[in-house]
Amino acid sequence: MEAAPAQVVAVTGGKGGVGKTNVCANLGVALARRGHQTLLLDADLGLANVEVLLGLRSAHNLSHVIDGLVSLEQTLVEGPAGLKIVPGASGISRMAALSRAEQAGLVQAFSELTVPVDFLLVDTAAGIAAEVVGFARAAHEVVVVVCDEPASLTDAYALIKVLNQEHGVKRVHVVANMVSGAQEGRRVYAKLAHVTDRFLDLVLSYLGNVPLDEYLRRAVQRQRAVADLYPRSRSAAAFEDLATCLESWPRPRGASGHLQFFLERVVQAEVAVP
Ligand SMILES: Nc1ncnc2c1ncn2[C@@H]1O[C@H](COP(=O)(O)OP(=O)(O)OP(=O)(O)O)[C@@H](O)[C@H]1O
Ligand SMILES: [Mg+2]
Protein backbone atom coordinates (compact mmCIF):
# COMPACT_ATOMS: atom_id res chain seq x y z
CA MET A 1 0.00 0.00 0.00
CA GLU A 2 1.28 3.48 -0.84
CA ALA A 3 1.77 5.54 2.32
CA ALA A 4 0.67 9.17 2.17
CA PRO A 5 3.57 11.60 2.44
CA ALA A 6 4.44 12.61 6.00
CA GLN A 7 6.00 15.90 6.94
CA VAL A 8 9.05 15.10 9.05
CA VAL A 9 10.00 17.89 11.44
CA ALA A 10 13.03 17.74 13.74
CA VAL A 11 12.76 19.84 16.91
CA THR A 12 16.19 20.72 18.18
CA GLY A 13 18.01 23.62 19.76
CA GLY A 14 21.66 23.14 20.56
CA LYS A 15 21.36 23.86 24.25
CA GLY A 16 19.83 21.76 27.02
CA GLY A 17 16.72 22.86 28.86
CA VAL A 18 15.51 25.43 26.33
CA GLY A 19 12.16 23.67 25.95
CA LYS A 20 12.65 21.32 22.98
CA THR A 21 10.63 18.46 24.47
CA ASN A 22 7.86 20.77 25.63
CA VAL A 23 7.59 22.40 22.22
CA CYS A 24 7.68 19.04 20.46
CA ALA A 25 5.09 17.36 22.70
CA ASN A 26 2.64 20.26 22.98
CA LEU A 27 2.93 21.09 19.29
CA GLY A 28 2.28 17.41 18.59
CA VAL A 29 -0.83 17.52 20.77
CA ALA A 30 -2.01 20.70 19.01
CA LEU A 31 -1.59 19.09 15.59
CA ALA A 32 -3.38 15.94 16.76
CA ARG A 33 -6.23 18.03 18.18
CA ARG A 34 -6.61 19.66 14.80
CA GLY A 35 -7.17 16.28 13.24
CA HIS A 36 -3.71 15.54 11.86
CA GLN A 37 -2.32 12.06 12.32
CA THR A 38 0.76 12.91 14.32
CA LEU A 39 3.62 10.72 15.41
CA LEU A 40 6.32 11.85 17.80
CA LEU A 41 9.68 10.08 17.75
CA ASP A 42 11.44 10.46 21.06
CA ALA A 43 15.05 10.61 19.93
CA ASP A 44 16.43 11.91 23.21
CA LEU A 45 17.88 9.56 25.78
CA GLY A 46 17.68 12.13 28.54
CA LEU A 47 15.49 11.74 31.56
CA ALA A 48 13.04 14.51 30.75
CA ASN A 49 11.64 12.55 27.84
CA VAL A 50 8.30 12.74 26.12
CA GLU A 51 6.74 9.88 28.05
CA VAL A 52 7.65 11.40 31.40
CA LEU A 53 6.44 14.79 30.23
CA LEU A 54 3.04 13.41 29.24
CA GLY A 55 2.77 10.87 32.04
CA LEU A 56 2.82 7.84 29.73
CA ARG A 57 4.55 4.49 29.91
CA SER A 58 5.68 2.23 27.17
CA ALA A 59 6.36 -1.47 27.25
CA HIS A 60 8.60 -1.46 24.19
CA ASN A 61 10.91 0.88 22.35
CA LEU A 62 13.00 1.05 19.19
CA SER A 63 15.55 -1.29 20.68
CA HIS A 64 12.96 -4.07 20.66
CA VAL A 65 12.14 -3.23 17.05
CA ILE A 66 15.82 -3.45 16.10
CA ASP A 67 15.99 -6.85 17.81
CA GLY A 68 13.00 -7.99 15.81
CA LEU A 69 10.94 -8.67 18.92
CA VAL A 70 8.05 -6.34 18.13
CA SER A 71 6.75 -4.32 15.19
CA LEU A 72 7.05 -0.56 15.21
CA GLU A 73 3.29 -0.38 15.63
CA GLN A 74 3.53 -2.36 18.87
CA THR A 75 5.83 0.27 20.40
CA LEU A 76 3.37 3.12 19.84
CA VAL A 77 2.07 4.81 22.96
CA GLU A 78 -1.15 6.78 22.75
CA GLY A 79 -0.95 10.34 24.07
CA PRO A 80 -3.48 13.19 24.34
CA ALA A 81 -5.81 13.79 21.39
CA GLY A 82 -4.56 10.63 19.71
CA LEU A 83 -0.95 11.79 19.40
CA LYS A 84 1.21 8.69 19.01
CA ILE A 85 4.65 8.37 20.49
CA VAL A 86 7.48 6.14 19.31
CA PRO A 87 9.63 5.59 22.39
CA GLY A 88 13.25 5.75 21.29
CA ALA A 89 15.10 4.89 24.51
CA SER A 90 18.15 2.68 24.00
CA GLY A 91 17.25 2.09 20.36
CA ILE A 92 18.34 5.63 19.60
CA SER A 93 21.82 5.14 21.05
CA ARG A 94 22.16 1.88 19.16
CA MET A 95 21.47 3.54 15.83
CA ALA A 96 25.10 4.64 15.63
CA ALA A 97 26.31 1.05 15.57
CA LEU A 98 23.71 -0.88 13.59
CA SER A 99 24.80 -3.64 11.24
CA ARG A 100 23.57 -3.39 7.67
CA ALA A 101 20.96 -6.05 8.37
CA GLU A 102 19.70 -4.21 11.46
CA GLN A 103 19.56 -0.95 9.51
CA ALA A 104 17.55 -2.60 6.80
CA GLY A 105 15.25 -4.13 9.42
CA LEU A 106 14.59 -0.78 11.07
CA VAL A 107 13.90 0.94 7.76
CA GLN A 108 11.60 -1.94 6.86
CA ALA A 109 9.79 -1.55 10.20
CA PHE A 110 8.99 2.06 9.35
CA SER A 111 7.84 1.14 5.86
CA GLU A 112 5.45 -1.42 7.34
CA LEU A 113 3.73 1.07 9.62
CA THR A 114 0.11 0.98 8.59
CA VAL A 115 -1.13 3.94 10.65
CA PRO A 116 -1.37 7.01 8.44
CA VAL A 117 1.04 9.79 9.35
CA ASP A 118 0.64 13.46 8.42
CA PHE A 119 3.38 14.76 10.70
CA LEU A 120 6.34 13.04 12.28
CA LEU A 121 7.90 15.25 14.94
CA VAL A 122 11.32 14.25 16.21
CA ASP A 123 12.41 15.39 19.65
CA THR A 124 16.20 15.48 19.75
CA ALA A 125 18.78 15.75 22.50
CA ALA A 126 20.79 18.91 23.14
CA GLY A 127 24.16 19.45 21.51
CA ILE A 128 25.67 18.83 18.10
CA ALA A 129 26.46 15.13 18.49
CA ALA A 130 26.26 13.03 15.33
CA GLU A 131 22.86 11.56 16.16
CA VAL A 132 21.26 14.94 16.82
CA VAL A 133 22.61 16.32 13.56
CA GLY A 134 21.68 13.06 11.81
CA PHE A 135 18.01 13.41 12.69
CA ALA A 136 17.91 17.10 11.82
CA ARG A 137 19.57 16.72 8.43
CA ALA A 138 17.29 13.82 7.50
CA ALA A 139 14.10 15.72 8.33
CA HIS A 140 12.23 17.89 5.84
CA GLU A 141 12.08 20.82 8.19
CA VAL A 142 14.17 21.80 11.19
CA VAL A 143 12.74 23.76 14.11
CA VAL A 144 15.31 25.31 16.43
CA VAL A 145 14.10 26.30 19.89
CA VAL A 146 15.92 29.24 21.47
CA CYS A 147 15.46 31.39 24.50
CA ASP A 148 16.78 34.82 25.29
CA GLU A 149 20.08 33.78 26.81
CA PRO A 150 23.52 34.19 25.25
CA ALA A 151 24.30 30.47 25.72
CA SER A 152 21.08 29.43 24.00
CA LEU A 153 21.75 31.76 21.06
CA THR A 154 25.38 30.70 20.62
CA ASP A 155 24.53 27.00 20.88
CA ALA A 156 21.65 27.40 18.41
CA TYR A 157 24.01 29.19 16.04
CA ALA A 158 26.66 26.46 16.40
CA LEU A 159 24.07 23.81 15.54
CA ILE A 160 22.65 25.74 12.58
CA LYS A 161 26.17 26.34 11.28
CA VAL A 162 27.02 22.61 11.33
CA LEU A 163 23.70 21.75 9.66
CA ASN A 164 24.25 24.36 6.99
CA GLN A 165 27.95 24.05 6.26
CA GLU A 166 28.43 20.33 6.70
CA HIS A 167 25.04 18.92 5.80
CA GLY A 168 23.56 21.30 3.28
CA VAL A 169 20.53 22.31 5.36
CA LYS A 170 19.17 25.45 3.70
CA ARG A 171 16.13 26.28 5.80
CA VAL A 172 15.63 26.52 9.55
CA HIS A 173 12.58 27.67 11.53
CA VAL A 174 12.96 29.38 14.88
CA VAL A 175 10.73 29.17 17.95
CA ALA A 176 11.53 31.68 20.68
CA ASN A 177 10.62 30.00 23.95
CA MET A 178 10.15 31.38 27.46
CA VAL A 179 9.78 34.95 26.22
CA SER A 180 7.51 37.66 27.60
CA GLY A 181 5.52 37.94 24.38
CA ALA A 182 5.54 38.51 20.64
CA GLN A 183 7.89 41.47 20.80
CA GLU A 184 10.62 39.72 22.74
CA GLY A 185 10.15 36.64 20.54
CA ARG A 186 10.87 38.69 17.43
CA ARG A 187 13.85 40.28 19.11
CA VAL A 188 15.38 36.92 20.00
CA TYR A 189 14.84 35.75 16.45
CA ALA A 190 16.46 38.94 15.10
CA LYS A 191 19.57 38.33 17.20
CA LEU A 192 20.01 34.89 15.68
CA ALA A 193 19.13 36.06 12.16
CA HIS A 194 21.73 38.81 12.46
CA VAL A 195 24.55 36.24 12.64
CA THR A 196 23.10 33.60 10.31
CA ASP A 197 22.42 36.20 7.59
CA ARG A 198 25.97 37.39 7.86
CA PHE A 199 27.85 34.12 7.93
CA LEU A 200 25.65 31.38 6.54
CA ASP A 201 23.91 30.63 3.28
CA LEU A 202 20.48 29.66 4.55
CA VAL A 203 16.97 30.94 5.08
CA LEU A 204 16.12 31.47 8.71
CA SER A 205 12.43 32.00 9.33
CA TYR A 206 10.47 32.89 12.40
CA LEU A 207 7.86 30.32 13.36
CA GLY A 208 6.67 32.07 16.51
CA ASN A 209 7.04 32.29 20.24
CA VAL A 210 5.94 30.42 23.33
CA PRO A 211 5.66 32.70 26.34
CA LEU A 212 7.18 31.90 29.69
CA ASP A 213 4.05 30.53 31.29
CA GLU A 214 3.45 29.39 34.84
CA TYR A 215 0.63 27.16 33.56
CA LEU A 216 3.04 25.30 31.31
CA ARG A 217 5.33 24.68 34.27
CA ARG A 218 2.38 23.38 36.29
CA ALA A 219 1.34 21.10 33.44
CA VAL A 220 4.91 19.72 33.34
CA GLN A 221 4.74 19.02 37.07
CA ARG A 222 1.46 17.19 36.62
CA GLN A 223 2.76 15.32 33.58
CA ARG A 224 0.06 16.54 31.24
CA ALA A 225 -0.18 18.48 28.00
CA VAL A 226 -0.86 22.14 28.76
CA ALA A 227 -3.79 22.17 26.32
CA ASP A 228 -5.48 19.41 28.35
CA LEU A 229 -5.13 21.06 31.73
CA TYR A 230 -5.14 24.75 30.87
CA PRO A 231 -6.61 25.15 27.38
CA ARG A 232 -6.99 28.89 27.85
CA SER A 233 -3.42 29.53 28.93
CA ARG A 234 -1.10 31.69 26.84
CA SER A 235 1.21 28.78 26.09
CA ALA A 236 -1.65 26.54 24.91
CA ALA A 237 -2.69 29.34 22.52
CA ALA A 238 0.91 29.68 21.35
CA PHE A 239 1.11 25.96 20.48
CA GLU A 240 -2.12 26.32 18.50
CA ASP A 241 -0.54 29.18 16.55
CA LEU A 242 2.59 27.14 15.86
CA ALA A 243 0.42 24.25 14.66
CA THR A 244 -1.40 26.61 12.27
CA CYS A 245 1.95 27.62 10.81
CA LEU A 246 2.99 24.00 10.28
CA GLU A 247 -0.31 23.33 8.51
CA SER A 248 0.56 26.00 5.95
CA TRP A 249 3.92 24.47 5.03
CA PRO A 250 4.02 22.86 1.60
CA ARG A 251 3.65 19.09 1.87
CA PRO A 252 6.54 16.90 0.79
CA ARG A 253 5.93 14.97 -2.36
CA GLY A 254 7.12 11.64 -3.70
CA ALA A 255 9.51 9.27 -2.00
CA SER A 256 10.92 11.87 0.36
CA GLY A 257 7.56 11.94 2.12
CA HIS A 258 7.78 8.34 3.14
CA LEU A 259 8.91 7.49 6.61
CA GLN A 260 11.29 4.76 5.51
CA PHE A 261 13.08 7.34 3.39
CA PHE A 262 13.64 9.47 6.48
CA LEU A 263 14.93 6.48 8.46
CA GLU A 264 17.24 5.53 5.61
CA ARG A 265 18.73 8.98 5.70
CA VAL A 266 19.17 8.78 9.48
CA VAL A 267 20.92 5.43 9.53
CA GLN A 268 23.05 6.24 6.50
CA ALA A 269 24.19 9.43 8.21
CA GLU A 270 25.17 7.41 11.25
CA VAL A 271 27.32 5.13 9.13
CA ALA A 272 28.93 8.06 7.37
CA VAL A 273 30.10 9.58 10.66
CA PRO A 274 33.23 7.85 12.01
N1 LIG B 1 7.36 28.32 27.86
C1 LIG B 1 7.70 27.85 29.08
N2 LIG B 1 7.20 28.39 30.20
C2 LIG B 1 7.53 27.93 31.42
N3 LIG B 1 8.38 26.91 31.63
C3 LIG B 1 8.92 26.32 30.56
C4 LIG B 1 8.62 26.75 29.22
N4 LIG B 1 9.30 25.96 28.36
C5 LIG B 1 9.99 25.08 29.11
N5 LIG B 1 9.78 25.29 30.42
C6 LIG B 1 10.38 24.57 31.54
O1 LIG B 1 11.72 24.29 31.21
C7 LIG B 1 12.06 22.96 31.54
C8 LIG B 1 12.85 22.35 30.41
O2 LIG B 1 12.01 22.11 29.31
P1 LIG B 1 12.24 20.89 28.32
O3 LIG B 1 12.44 19.63 29.06
O4 LIG B 1 11.17 20.94 27.30
O5 LIG B 1 13.62 21.34 27.68
P2 LIG B 1 14.57 20.52 26.69
O6 LIG B 1 15.19 21.52 25.80
O7 LIG B 1 13.82 19.41 26.08
O8 LIG B 1 15.63 19.95 27.71
P3 LIG B 1 16.72 18.78 27.43
O9 LIG B 1 17.84 19.43 26.71
O10 LIG B 1 17.08 18.32 28.80
O11 LIG B 1 16.04 17.72 26.61
C9 LIG B 1 10.77 22.23 31.81
O12 LIG B 1 10.85 21.64 33.07
C10 LIG B 1 9.68 23.24 31.80
O13 LIG B 1 9.07 23.30 33.05
MG1 LIG C 1 14.22 17.37 25.96
Image (cartoon, rainbow, N blue to C red):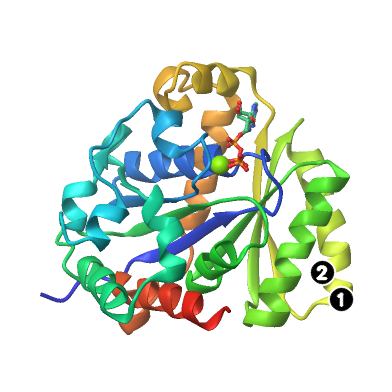
Amino acid at pointer 2: Thr
Asked if marks 2 and 1 touch (Cβ < 8 Å), the reply is yes
Residue found farthest to the left: 1
Q: Residue at x 46, y 16 (%)?
A: 222
Location of residue 97 with respect to 234 vertically, above or below = below
Location of residue 247 with respect to 210 vertically, above or below = below
- Residue sitting nearer the eye, 135 or 62: 62
Q: Residue at x 39, y 39 (%)?
A: 29
Q: Quadrant of the N terminus?
A: bottom left
The numbered dot on residue 196 is 2
Q: Quadrant of the C terminus?
A: bottom right
- Pointer 2 residue Cβ closer than 8 Å to ligand 1: no
Give left or right: position of 199 versus 70: right
Quick one: SS at disc 2? helix
- Residue sitting nearer the eye, 71 or 216: 71
Q: Quadrant of residue 156?
A: bottom right
Q: Residue 265: x percent and y percent?
A: 43, 78
Label 1 sits on residue = 199
Q: Is residue 230 visible?
A: yes
